[in-house]
Image (cartoon, rainbow, N blue to C red):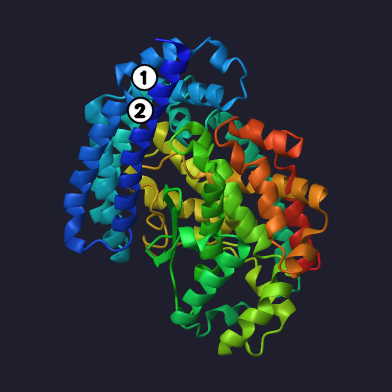
């Protein structure tokens, strides 16, 4: 078979596989939004059947034969061409997939589905004892998976590869330690400040129906195409791409708390705008896929924080927001800006301020490493969790649901995902600095309601490339420098130094 024929056969096959995956994505969205309570057991079996089908397709020997016919040909001579990028990434995905036994792939899919549905009810009931068997099952299977796909240094590296290709635990430990020291130093300076934002105003009455209208309005203003998306309520916010023209987000509303729905919606819209910016003509191939979860999180964290919590943004949007909530009638613009940026060590990661957020991730990263290094068992997780929260943040969870059970990730087997959030913050700050160099004063642009220039810059530098470049290389090409914590530390010190008059 000629390389061109092999490439077209492979591309068609992989696009068909992507259609099956997109149906699975739709079922996953339904499971976390509107599925009847009695439907979870059947949905878990559906996911198991789909996993068996997908694993069979991902390990089809013809993929290896097609790749053998293409590699080394003129078709992939240019390493930056779409064809070369697709073939390189298809080879990577295939080599990982064939190492995973079919039974393990199916067992993982079913355990993850069962774990997520159990977590939703057991977290609400604060039932750690009831949740442990699900978590142990998923963890054991993830350990099997790490051994199956292989690693050079330690099992956790095998899991990182699924979310941040090329990343390693040792490098993350060094990066996160540097960031942790800088964060704690800034936190101590803030604790010594006399500035005390009136955070109680965020806990007044905010009618849910108004919050819902605001969520649609603000995400649309930022650039989320609502004709190709929707916003639904859920227990834990997420974004999910079904395919071109269908990229959905969820949020959660509290009638007595402003931040959760507003910033949760903006965060998930950041993810969605990345998915909507991927080249639709390459859908179903690596060139039409996000390169990593770290880069994905850079988009959501940028829109949530560097844009959505900026003074320029609120100069534009607060006059639109304030009249809609009687609770804000006595709150001025600058006070409101301080309040939504207030720094307070807290229990809940998704509601954490920017300064302390990475400490939440550091805790989870260290616990995951300990689990996969055999230094910690599931039975001992709550005690280890609480000890780290006391040490790093000076707070102690009063229960399980606001402590070790607060995140959905472990129930769904997403070990290795949490570092993506801090990598996202690192990448976001570096990308934002580069965009500001190219575009000028972004704060002034936001104050005019001009968000399109930043989105277009991200489309050009990040979105359109799909998986053309590895994540670190993509960031370096976009910014002119290798990824480091420098830009994030500068940003945090500048913003919070001004807010707290340090």
In the picture, measured across the screen, residue 382 lies left or right of residue 459, that is left
Separation (CA) of disc 1 from disc 2 = 9 Å
Q: From the image, tell me which residue sits under label 1.
A: 63
Q: What residue is drawn where x is 63% and y is 83%?
A: 322
Label 1 with label 2: CB-CB less than 8 Å: yes
Q: Position of residue 165 (x, y in %)?
A: 52, 30
Q: From the image, tell me which residue sits under label 2.
A: 13
In this view of the protein, which residue sits in the foreground, 163 or 31? 31
Q: Position of residue 66 (x, y in %)?
A: 39, 15
Measured along the vertical axis of the image, is residue 279 above or below residue 350?
above
Q: Quadrant of the N terminus?
A: top left
Residue 180 visible within the image: no
In this view of the protein, which residue sits in the foreground, 289 or 210? 289
Q: Earlier in the sequence, mark 1 or mark 2?
A: 2
Q: What residue is drawn where x is 27% and y is 60%?
A: 122
Residue 441 visible within the image: yes
In this view of the protein, which residue sits in the foreground, 58 or 75? 75
Q: Quadrant of the C terminus?
A: bottom right
Q: Quadrant of residue 7?
A: top left
Measured along the vertical axis of the image, is residue 19 above or below residue 316?
above
In the picture, measured across the screen, residue 60 lies left or right of residue 370, that is left
Q: Which mark is residue 500?
A: none
From the viewer's perspective, is the residue at label 1 or at label 2 nearer?
Answer: 2
In the picture, measured across the screen, residue 168 lies left or right of residue 142, that is right
Label 2: element kind: helix
Q: Quadrant of residue 223?
A: bottom right
Measured along the vertical axis of the image, is residue 176 above or below residue 450?
above
Q: Position of residue 118 (x, y in %)?
A: 25, 55
Q: What residue is drawn where x is 67% and y is 43%?
A: 460
């Amino acid at each position: 078979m000629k390389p061109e024929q092999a490439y077209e056969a492979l591309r068609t096959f992989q696009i068909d596989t992507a259609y099956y995956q997109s149906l699975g994505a739709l079922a996953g969205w339904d499971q976390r939004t509107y599925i009847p309570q009695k439907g979870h057991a059947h949905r878990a079996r559906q996911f198991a059947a789909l996993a068996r089908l997908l694993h069979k397709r991902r390990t089809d020997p013809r993929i290896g034969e097609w790749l053998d016919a293409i590699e080394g040909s003129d078709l992939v001579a240019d390493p930056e061409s779409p064809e070369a990028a697709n073939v390189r990434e298809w080879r990577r995905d295939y080599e990982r997939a064939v190492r995973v036994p079919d039974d393990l792939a199916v067992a993982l899919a079913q355990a993850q589905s069962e774990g997520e549905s159990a977590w939703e009810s057991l977290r609400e009931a604060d039932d750690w004892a009831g949740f442990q068997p699900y978590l142990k099952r998923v963890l054991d299977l993830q350990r099997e998976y790490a051994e199956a796909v292989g690693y050079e240094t330690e099992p956790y590296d095998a899991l990182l590869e699924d979310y941040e290709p090329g990343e390693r635990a040792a490098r993350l430990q060094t990066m996160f330690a540097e960031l942790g020291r800088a964060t704690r130093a800034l936190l101590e300076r803030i604790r010594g400040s006399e500035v005390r934002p009136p955070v109680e105003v965020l806990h007044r009455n905010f009618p849910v129906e108004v919050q819902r209208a605001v969520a649609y309005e603000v995400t649309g203003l930022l650039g989320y195409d609502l004709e190709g998306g929707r916003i639904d309520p859920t227990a834990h916010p997420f974004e999910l791409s079904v395919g071109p023209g269908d990229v959905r987000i969820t949020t959660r509303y509290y009638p007595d708390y402003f931040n959760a729905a507003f910033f949760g919606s903006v965060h998930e819209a950041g993810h969605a705008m990345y998915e909507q910016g991927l080249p639709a003509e390459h859908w179903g191939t690596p060139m039409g896929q996000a390169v990593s979860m770290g880069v994905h999180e850079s988009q959501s964290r940028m829109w949530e924080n560097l844009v959505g919590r900026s003074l320029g943004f609120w100069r534009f949007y607060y006059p639109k927001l304030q009249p809609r909530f009687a609770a804000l009638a006595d709150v001025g613009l600058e006070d409101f800006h301080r309040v939504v940026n207030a720094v307070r060590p807290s229990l809940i990661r998704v509601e954490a301020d920017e300064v302390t957020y990475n400490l939440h991730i550091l805790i989870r990263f260290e616990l995951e490493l300990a689990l996969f290094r055999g230094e910690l068992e599931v039975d001992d997780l709550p005690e280890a969790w609480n000890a780290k929260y006391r040490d790093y943040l000076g707070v102690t969870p009063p229960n399980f649901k606001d402590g070790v059970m607060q995140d959905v990730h472990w129930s769904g087997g997403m070990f290795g995902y949490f570092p993506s959030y801090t990598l996202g913050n690192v990448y976001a700050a570096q990308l934002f600095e580069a965009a500001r160099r190219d575009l000028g004063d972004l704060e002034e642009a936001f104050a005019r309601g001009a968000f399109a220039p930043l989105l277009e810059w991200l489309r050009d530098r990040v979105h359109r490339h799909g998986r053309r470049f590895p994540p670190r290389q993509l960031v370096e090409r976009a910014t002119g420098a290798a990824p480091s914590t420098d830009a994030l530390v500068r940003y945090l010190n500048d913003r919070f130094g001004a807010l707290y008059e340090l």
